[in-house]
Amino acid sequence: SSIKHIEQLKYFYFFNPFCHLKIKKIIDDFRPNIILSWMNRASRLIPTKDKVDFIAVGRLGGYYKIKNYVNCDYLITNTLDLKNYVTDCGWDQNKIEFIPNFVNKNNNSSIRSLSEKKKIICMGRFHKNKGIDLLLKALTFLPQYELWIVGKGEEKSYYNNVILNLKLDKRVFFYEWTENISKFLNSADLLVCPSRHEPFGNIVVDGWAHKLPVIVSDVGGPKIMVKHKVNGLKFKNGDYFDLLNQIQKIEKNYKLKQSLIKNGFKEFNSLYSEKIIVEKYVNFFKKISK
């Protein structure tokens, strides 16, 4: 209700003079105090300061080329690892702010399943970086579990081949990505994030928000977010036998499982709720506006 006007522009991968000129006109007319650009393409559109003396803030969600943020005064990263990356690229650490992503609350929906098997859930883009093949290999040693994979991407045909070769076709199910991820998370027993490369890992926080025990690879954002045996378990990146070992720990130790769930939910409420993250943005904007 506080947004007074929205302008929508079609952006192309190649240089588009019209788009740059239109953005500049919007800035000249609106005269903003702060401009927040989201990732590479939007940040490249920030013009040099002319009629309006605004503060430009670029937000990074990955290990992007810093040259895209040359017209930014400050940067926001969604992980501490990214903040270190930007500092190593030559940015003044006093002009970099770490603000993580928030996730939505549990909407309490679920899916009815006729299977009595326990359910592992894995969510995200079907890409080699996501390490879903590692989870499939671990699943061969876990006959009491079935796996729900939610998402889409170019690796699906490869996963199907792995599933057939490992004779897992009766225990692995694919679902299209949806905005209502609560219905999947509320129906699962365990969330695994097996990524080989992961800057942040929203799905880890989603697991905490839905009171699931979480297992992650020790890489990128999840490595920093998850405290082993406190709010989740970690396995060695790329090692599906270690992943299997961590799943078996949860299977055999009910007390540990409940402790992970309790501490993960506490972590979500204290650090990653929408209210907390919005306050961080507002406070940061106030600080740089002084």
Image (cartoon, helix red, strand yellow):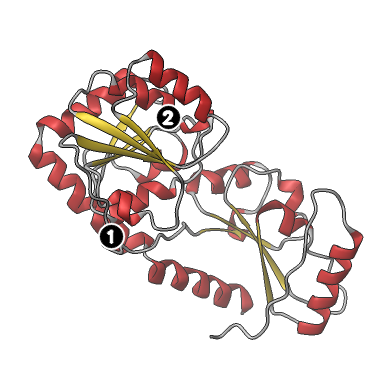
Residue 198, placed above or below residue 265: above
For residue 132, which numbered disc appears in the image?
2
Could you tell me which residue is drawn at 70 percent across and 63 percent down? Answer: 73
Could you tell me which residue is drawn at 47 percent across and 29 percent down? Answer: 196
Point out the residue furthest to the right here. Answer: 17
- Judged left or right of residue 46, residue 140 is left
Residue 53, placed above or below residue 181: below
Residue 264, placed above or below residue 194: below
Indicate the quadrant where residue 119 lies: top left
Residue underneath mark 1 = 109
Dot 1 alpha-carbon crowd within 10 angstroms: few under 14, some 14 to 19, many 20 or more: few
Dot 2 alpha-carbon crowd within 10 angstroms: few under 14, some 14 to 19, many 20 or more: many
On the image, the x and y values in percent for residue 28 come to 83, 80
- Judged left or right of residue 129, residue 163 is left
Q: Amino acid at mark 1?
A: Ser
Could you tell me which residue is drawn at 85 percent across and 71 percent down? Answer: 22
Could you tell me which residue is drawn at 35 percent across and 15 percent down? Answer: 166
Indicate the quadrant where residue 289 lies: bottom right
On the image, the x and y values in percent for residue 261 come to 20, 49
Q: Amino acid at mark 2?
A: Ile
- Quadrant of the image containing the C terminus: bottom right
